[in-house]
Amino acid sequence: MDLLSTLVDKGLRRELPTREEALAVLATSDEELLDVVAAAGRVRRQWFGRRVKLNYLVNLKSGLCPEDCSYCSQRLGSEAGILKYSWLKPDEASRAAAAGVAGGAKRVCLVASGRGPTDRDVERVSRTIEAIKDENEGVEVCACLGLLSDGQAEKLRSAGADAYNHNLNTSEATYGDITTTHTYSDRVETVRHAQGAGLSACSGLIAGMGESDEDLIDVVFALRRLDPDSVPVNFLIPFEGTPLAKEWNLTPQRCLRILAMVRFVCPDVEVRLAGGREVHLRSMQPLALHLVNSIFLGDYLTSEGQAGQADLDMIADAGFEVEGADTTTLPGHRATAGAGCGGHADDGCGGGAAGGGCAPCGGPAATGEAPSDAPAEAADAGSGSAAAAHVVARGDQGARTDLVAVRRRGAGTDLAPNA
């Protein structure tokens, strides 16, 4: 179809589609879906070949967040039955990170929410970054700690952080409907703080919160202007006990169209398939690898993910390969432009052609010393998916068979991680 040919040509030239073209991708029919995936796949292969970058989440502290983000299982007033523990010590976080690295993860994402870190928190996370770097040669570390104050991004960078994640999540017009304790502009400012400190910016979105197609286009176009190096795409996990618990409105086909649209708008950035992929894409996850070039390995912050070995098997079976530590993720024109420093083209991610970034990366948000209550909770829950607590999802169509498994293993517990 003419639309897809136009979008492929623009993607190969790093040229921004029009809003109408991006909206048209979301409006394509299920009969056209494979054509849409194939077209966006051409753009993905142009800039990233068949490589898949693996990322691993470490939740440095869990629960008790004072922010009211409606999607979050750890929000103020959440009744979700999640783990709650205070800051992991640096050696505990390093051991948790090592499990992901052993599974093939190239980047470790250290997450803690709340409104933002204190200077003492930044010092604590800095020691954790140093411990991880000392034990895992060549690993990338991304921090996700909420809103940053002046000088904090620079301190993280000095400690060895490579990147900072702070998602925009949804459009500016609807942001106040999702969160009231901070603003959309607060998030934008934090991403710019990170870029100004020389950190690679990671900022993305959450789809499935009841937003319109226009909202999705607004946030993705805003991300292009903000110009992060990586764009995680989360699909809402509707945790029971949160205001969005009944928002079960995504299909696998809808998710694939969203991912294709993001790839066309940001053709040469690291598009990361993040939280909710197992729940919403289900058996169609392998098709998403033709659109994204990055995924999370194993579990998320407060929910269980697909087994790490299953992720590796899926990548191999689909004809892709895990990106090695010695490979530069970004295309040369972005890597040499000062990744994360805001030094890319004027029109944002993928810009520069002729004419033409707390929900933390990969899951519902988290929020000081070593966890004291977590081992007991974990012991009560047992091990593995079969013994995990489950949340039954219900929508307008009645009961669903999908179950969201709450994480009871890995960091902050006595149970082995899923990596």
Image (cartoon, grey):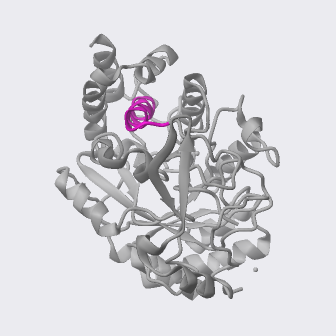
Left or right, residue 366 beside residue 398? right
Determine whether 278 is above or below 107 in the image.
above
Residue pictured at 31% horizontal, 61% vertical: 311
**Total numbered labels:** 0
Magenta-highlighted residues = 250-265
* Nearest the eye: 289 or 380: 380
Residue pictured at 42% horizontal, 32% vertical: 254
Is 220 a magenta residue?
Answer: no
Q: Quadrant of residue 342?
A: top right
Left or right, residue 232 beside residue 193? left
Q: Is residue 177 visible?
A: yes
Residue 127, image x, y percentages: 62, 81
Residue 146, image x, y percentages: 70, 58
Residue pictured at 28% horizontal, 21% vertical: 31
Residue 405, image x, y percentages: 50, 63
Q: Quadrant of residue 30?
A: top left
Q: Is residue 232 visible?
A: no
* Nearest the eye: 54 or 240: 240
* Nearest the eye: 266 or 408: 408
Residue pictured at 75% horizontal, 36% vertical: 177
**Secondary structure that dominates the magenta span:** helix
Is 260 a magenta residue?
Answer: yes
Determine whether 2 is above or below 377 in the image.
above
Which quadrant: the N terminus? top left
Which quadrant: the C terminus? bottom left
* Nearest the eye: 166 or 404: 404
